Amino acid sequence: MIVRFANSMRRRPDEGFIVVAVLWILGALAALASIYAIYVTNTALSLSVNDDRLQADALVTAGLELTAYRLSTQDVDARPTQGAFRFRMGRADVAVDFRSEAARIDLNLAPKELLAGLFAALGARYDAAESYADRIIGWRQKADVAGENNEAAAYRTAGLSYGPRQGPFPDVGELWLVLGLPPALVERALPFVTVFSGRADVDVLDAAPEVVAALPGMTPDRLYGILGQRGPGAANAQIVQGLLGSAQGASTQGGKAMRVTVHIAFDDGRRVSAETVILPLDDADEPFRVLLWHDDFDGPA
């Protein structure tokens, strides 16, 4: 009987191999299950992000269309140059602000004095500010074919792998490439410049205080007087015009292009912001044309 029990306890030589193989198979199945779980999770996350993007794009578009509608319901001369409104659509609250692009300094058309004034208002010494303005004009100004291209030579001398565009700025971000401009100063200047105004002057009724301070001949007393008198209505515009006197680069007329900022608050707590520039179109198949679109999905707006 003892012999029979001992025989029953013996295992065949291949039984250990079978156990190891089964364990390997179970491990592989567990790994595949983990990989599939990660795949499902990532797919769900991707679909969620894409869904948020589609919803955000639709809400921004709705904000732009409502802005264009508000502008198109009034005569061209009576259109507001700034405004704000809110609405709710779907599962989100949307806040919209719009302001005439003429409130910014156009990098392609502004004279040297206005560009230098902006850099000086942002903290640069005036002699340095004039040099920065020269560099901007050198970047946008077409080279004299018959003469020596001194501006391009300056970039080569500085060891840069590129030269000045010597054509219009297509985007304000190109300001980072202009020779000699300190990065900190460029960062401070970007909120006050544009390439969509199409004007050499600025609308002082809607411009930021830094832009008004950049006007040639502007004094602190005149600046405070202008800022204190700004407001809706023709009477305020006349008062501001009187305070401006013969100041160059100043206007009390808004531009056609509008910078529209849209802030979206979804019910689930997600926040999305977009900054756009639109050009309202009269008597056209489309109510407006989008000149710039930047949102949080592309980077902070």
Image (cartoon, rainbow, N blue to C red):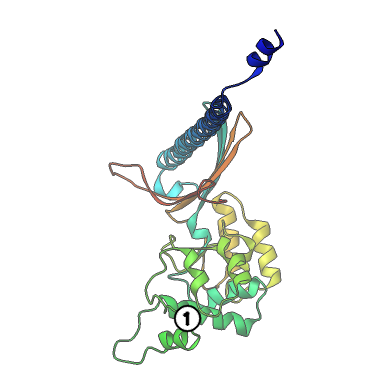
Q: Position of residue 297 (x, y in %)?
A: 52, 46
Q: Residue furthest bottom?
A: 147
In the rendered view, would you say 53 is above or below 254? above
Front-most of residues 36 and 59: 36
Left or right, residue 48 beside residue 291:
right
Q: Position of residue 111 (x, y in %)?
A: 48, 76
SS for tag 1? loop
User: Amino acid under label 1?
Assistant: Leu
Dot 1: few (<14), some (14–19), or many (≥20) neighbours within 10 Å? Answer: few
In the rendered view, would you say 283 is above or below 102? above
Total marks in image: 1
Q: Position of residue 87 (x, y in %)?
A: 55, 31
Q: Residue furthest top?
A: 1
Left or right, residue 91 beside residue 209:
left
Q: Give me the residue at 60% from left, 65% from top.
A: 187
Front-most of residues 279 and 49: 49
Q: Quadrant of residue 200?
A: bottom left
Residue 253 shows in the view:
no
Front-most of residues 244 and 132: 132
Residue 94 shows in the view:
yes
In the rendered view, would you say 33 is above or below 192? above
Q: Quadrant of the N terminus?
A: top right
Q: Give me the residue at 65% from left, 77% from top.
A: 124
Q: Give me the residue at 56% from left, 63% from top.
A: 190
Q: Which residue is mark 1?
A: 160
Front-most of residues 104 and 53: 53
Q: Position of residue 128 (x, y in %)?
A: 61, 83
